[in-house]
Image: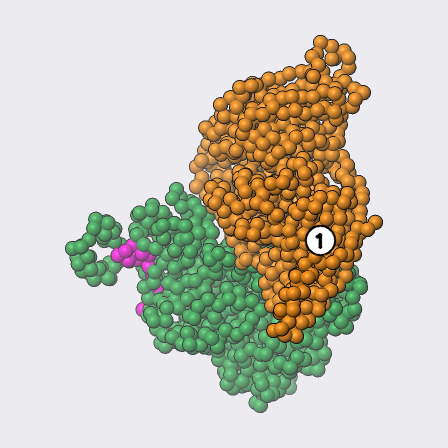
Chain colours: A orange, B green
Amino acid sequence: MALLQWQGDKSFICRLKFYVVMLKKSTFLLLAGFFISLFVEAQVLRSPDGNFQMEFSLTNKGEPSYQLNFKNKPVVLSSLLGFDLKNDEIDLLEGFQVKNSETSSKDEIWNPVWGEENQIRNHYNEFLVELKQVETGRIIKIRFRLFDTGLGFRYEFPVQENMGHFVVQEERTQFAMAGDHTAFWIPGDYDTQEYDYMESKLTEIRSLMEEAITPNASQTPFSDTGVQTALMMKSADGLYINIHEAALIDYPAMHLDLNDQDLVFESHLTPDSQGNKGFLVTPVQSPWRTVIVGENAAKILESRITYNLNEPSKIENTSWIKPMKYVGVWWEMITGQSSWAYTDELKAVKLGVTDYTQVKPNGKHGATTANVKKYIDFAAKHGFDGVLVEGWNVGWEDWFGNSKDYVFDFLTPYPDFDIDAVRDYAKAKGVQMIMHHETSSSVRNYERHMDEAYQLMKDYGYLAVKSGYVGDIIPRGEYHYSQWIVNHYQYAIEKAAEYQIMVNAHEAVRPTGVARTWPNLIANESARGTEYQAFGGSKANHVTILPFTRQIGGPMDYTPGIFEMDVFNGSHVNSTLANQLALYVTMYSPLQMAADYPENYDRFPDAFQFIKDVAIDWEKSLYLEAEPGYYLTIARKAKDSGDWFVGNVNGMAGRTGQVSFNFLDPSKSYIAVIYADKADAHFKSNPQAYEIKKFAVDAKSVLKQFSAPGGGYAVHIKEATKEELKGLKKLK
Amino acid sequence: MALLQWQGDKSFICRLKFYVVMLKKSTFLLLAGFFISLFVEAQVLRSPDGNFQMEFSLTNKGEPSYQLNFKNKPVVLSSLLGFDLKNDEIDLLEGFQVKNSETSSKDEIWNPVWGEENQIRNHYNEFLVELKQVETGRIIKIRFRLFDTGLGFRYEFPVQENMGHFVVQEERTQFAMAGDHTAFWIPGDYDTQEYDYMESKLTEIRSLMEEAITPNASQTPFSDTGVQTALMMKSADGLYINIHEAALIDYPAMHLDLNDQDLVFESHLTPDSQGNKGFLVTPVQSPWRTVIVGENAAKILESRITYNLNEPSKIENTSWIKPMKYVGVWWEMITGQSSWAYTDELKAVKLGVTDYTQVKPNGKHGATTANVKKYIDFAAKHGFDGVLVEGWNVGWEDWFGNSKDYVFDFLTPYPDFDIDAVRDYAKAKGVQMIMHHETSSSVRNYERHMDEAYQLMKDYGYLAVKSGYVGDIIPRGEYHYSQWIVNHYQYAIEKAAEYQIMVNAHEAVRPTGVARTWPNLIANESARGTEYQAFGGSKANHVTILPFTRQIGGPMDYTPGIFEMDVFNGSHVNSTLANQLALYVTMYSPLQMAADYPENYDRFPDAFQFIKDVAIDWEKSLYLEAEPGYYLTIARKAKDSGDWFVGNVNGMAGRTGQVSFNFLDPSKSYIAVIYADKADAHFKSNPQAYEIKKFAVDAKSVLKQFSAPGGGYAVHIKEATKEELKGLKKLK
């Protein structure tokens, strides 16, 4: 297969003219550069379906560059590649010549442990170019993989005589945009990802940045035009373009800094406290930089580029990794109704010194044995797998904002949390307890206690842990997404795997498909989750954007399922109840919470039935309607039951969508239960106005369904016998 | 006992005049301050023997202050106490009033696990003052303990409503000197203690600083007049004054910054990467600040203030803690004759990736099984307890200067080091192997591997570990002596205790008597050790100063015993051979190395006999002659045998000293073997000119003995029968 063609560098003639002029005043050195560049020709790689064309070339200065077209439309204009180095006189930017190149291709199917589908095709053509920097003799390789949904590429630094250790000052990867696209963006920040999305033209980012930077417990924005990945864009001519990274391992997380004159994004890595952006030792490679492209937004969601660019699972026996639906002692603290802390009397806590038996309980501690038993009862009654309990361990009185090194021991329960009794009660009820490790970003302290903490989980039968990294990192001056801290998150995942523990890390770096390699990473937060609905609210269209941005890298523990929108602390949840149900389908995660109080579910048992019914692991997923910021409709087939579930979330304006059920087996009949907004529903004024309808459906059915502002709908489609269908209206 | 007297503030009259003037233009606030200060009177504490008088008072601004006299001579003039805080508007410097005060006294004997003597008297009078800052309501306590050898005091921050967590911007403890003393100092530095000592007047420090700052692998000097503790000084009127700290736990190490106009030292704490100088949580206390004082220099060495101010041992069963005399595969690497690294082929090593079986050995790797067996044979033959092996584990090819996070795993031997065979061979020969953990200052990496590394030691029967912290700290920007890293050294000691492992930490923070509490900390380097004799040499009087400075805090693994002064790499050891022998007595340590090559000991078997004979644990120690920088003679009685050993080290000029043997049992007779410089010996030109003499001695004997420049002598005194004494000359 002719994956690759050598063709004349289109700009050759122009360059030649330039050289002639330059030669008149040139030195031998320039001349040498000239002769090298004379041999440079563009090298072209095509995607398996031929729609994408990636062109690699060296500029006249020997700078590596690439460009990407889709069906002859430019996606990425000619963009430079390279690195500024910290301790070397000569950067890795120019003076390169092509030493070697090779092409290959791959087409394979692999089966994820959990996921949106039970098999994933990894199909690409690859171009690997080996570049030699003439002056230094250093070798770098750039590996491009072109899929039918876009491009991935990374830098590789092989073992070599002239480069062993090096410090990155900055990665200088460009993504030159072909127009002033509409972008769904959040501010670039070294410490938080928990922003509401802005929708604007690229050229409007600068003027909107101040508005976009809303307060957070730890935040370090760095540029007026810096944004985070996954960055979702839409071009004027209808192309959807998504830039992210894959396989972020022991490397700083990448941001994109926009030159809004030229519309060129450049990589901006997260520094350490001294401004270093990566200490690398050969052999080593960067994470993959990805550009996912589609003619419609659904194509972005269909792409499996991010997972495909990660290594296969390093966990051999994955039988202990199981998707979970759970409830927990959490929303009541988030809304201020109860507290993580046991007492209000302690100005400061010293673990091992503070005697909790000598202080007065505050009377609103959430993680009491009695309260936890209530949640266990609820979970058992309604078939949930697990119960999360936050605030069970000593130290919450002063955990936040004090830069406290020894903040938690992850071992010692509060006096009113009987960990033995809870274990026994949960076991008797057939419910799994979910552990909680808030680190307060004191990462050394967590690592020091990690073995004991994981061992306690094993001893008490906890299968999964929710970890948290709230507040500024300790050691002070380090950032949440620097190489050193990214290395920590990975360490926690790999050590958890040794203990056969599943991890759901909050405030950790945004995922980049690492869950393929370490499938015990069953979820992350790493974005603005439901908690913000209790902190003043999120934009009502937030959930129509997250699947195109945050979820490109992996599942999010979004903690949906809020039924009472006016919460205890006075904040309002900007969502209708039907929208909350739809999230179990649209926000894919193998870990799904029903976050509201049991009492609120008891008030709406008919709606709650959907949360009980909905699956959490899927055979396949179909992206029926998709427009980031506006609407998203997904149908998924449950892995176990074969039931189908459809979810629609809607943006700020009411909308009636239409989806065909042609994904159903034409030879079968089904019952569809539709949980939808009423006509007068509204995320602000009337969020609980929902209706539940039941229809007989088949592969010829088409659902025309209204969704309110901030609304949506959820559908459960189950194969049915004629008996069961009797008397049911047929959906037209 | 009237420990404490209240007496009129001597400066009261002067202050009153000041107030009268000020009152004319005063505000109410000043007036309030005035009334508070009216109630301030000096409070006086005396040492048990009455020689010391410490006076505490508040200034008219409510600043805590103290002064110290010895036999009515001023030692510390009126000096302020307090803290700058980082995040609080009001510092802890002024506006205090005395809320309460109490006095107490203690007189106890305790027995160290190892030491210069087998019982230590802890005898002091104490004054504890509780101060309230009127404006903030904050409480601090200052606890003063006055011993017969000097003063210790510390700050205490009790649990209180108005202060829970606080960040120290700077500790503002002053030590106002009464004159332009002669000081033995090294530059204040956040990262190294490995300097040669300067001897100068305090006012000369500034002009000598540049000369004093010699290169080191990691160094961060901070001030033209900043020096380290323990700082040894001598006043014009013959007082010896030593300033240091005790019980440095989870707090930054203190330097002293000199105001050389006023001759006032002020504490200067080691910052973190952001300039923070301590994150404290109540209840908490500072380390003790100590001022040891004597009319002669020997009194400084007799003082046990540093240990007495530390907590008793937290290790209950200390039977596994045993002093050790050892040899090792070390000096041959230090001198460049062999290498830590296995190969010269690797530009960079990736642990777990690099395949050492595929590279060519460099042929000079020191830690080969064969070479180690040679050392084991030598240790067994000559009765040494242990053999240290450096460079046994993979990673030494690029361990230094690359800021490499995962630099060692502390587990994987090089292909030519058969850890099983070594274990078996050592066991068969009755020799203990000593582990080596070089961290390259990558402290997180060490902590991650610590459990496994210690467990490997247990599995292979290693009782002790030499750890190292060469190079800049990782995380980058942190310093060797900041709170966060001090906390790490302590973590390593305490975790080692869990495994019943003894620790000898090199490049760690200077000791402050913590070995009383954690007696498994059997030694530190934390100063310029013998290795510098192979790095260009140390001053020949270096070892006459170290006991007054570095060793105030605890034993030093100085690694003496060099017999061949012209070493392989061309450097010269500035010491005579007799001086090297004396170090086993003068440089107290429960861990003593015979550092030279076995071959060099074989060349001088008669002198080597002293190293074989000398004890390493003592019943008592007598400081017979002492003048820092010039000479030091110590006699010690061995704990087991009852033998006496005398060591004399000498400064730059030849000197004949005279010591009486009146410490011997008057009813007994002894043989003394004297290892001394010949008359023409000299550290530079004739270092190996020694002579060994044997005498009959008793309690009436007086030794008049010449020591060469950079020389010294060592004496072994053993009880003898008449039979044994027959024919021996009597020492006059």
Lateral position of residue B81 relative to residue A318, left or right:
left
Q: Is residue A463 visible?
A: yes
Viewer-nearest residue: B111 or A403: A403
Lateral position of residue A698 relative to residue A378, left or right:
right
For image coordinates 68% across by 54% down, the residue present is: A66
Residue B542 sits inside the magenta stretch: no
Q: Where does the image place residue A666, in percent across and percent down from the top left?
A: 79, 22
- Rendered view: A509 above or below A590: below
Q: Where does the image place residue A1, in percent across and percent down from the top left?
A: 83, 49
Extreme residue in the top direction: A727
- Rendered view: B562 above or below A53: below
Viewer-nearest residue: A402 or A413: A402
For image coordinates 58% across by 51% down, the residue present is: A264
In which quadrant is the C terminus of chain A drawn?
top right
Q: Read off the magenta span.
A: B57-72
Q: Where does the image place residue B470, in percent across and percent down from the top left?
A: 60, 65
Residue B70 sits inside the magenta stretch: yes
Amino acid on which the number 1 mark rests in the picture: Glu
For image coordinates 63% across by 36% down, the residue present is: A547
Q: Is residue B122 visible?
A: no
Q: Where does the image place residue A35, in percent across and percent down from the top left?
A: 71, 69
Residue that badge 1 annotates:
A55
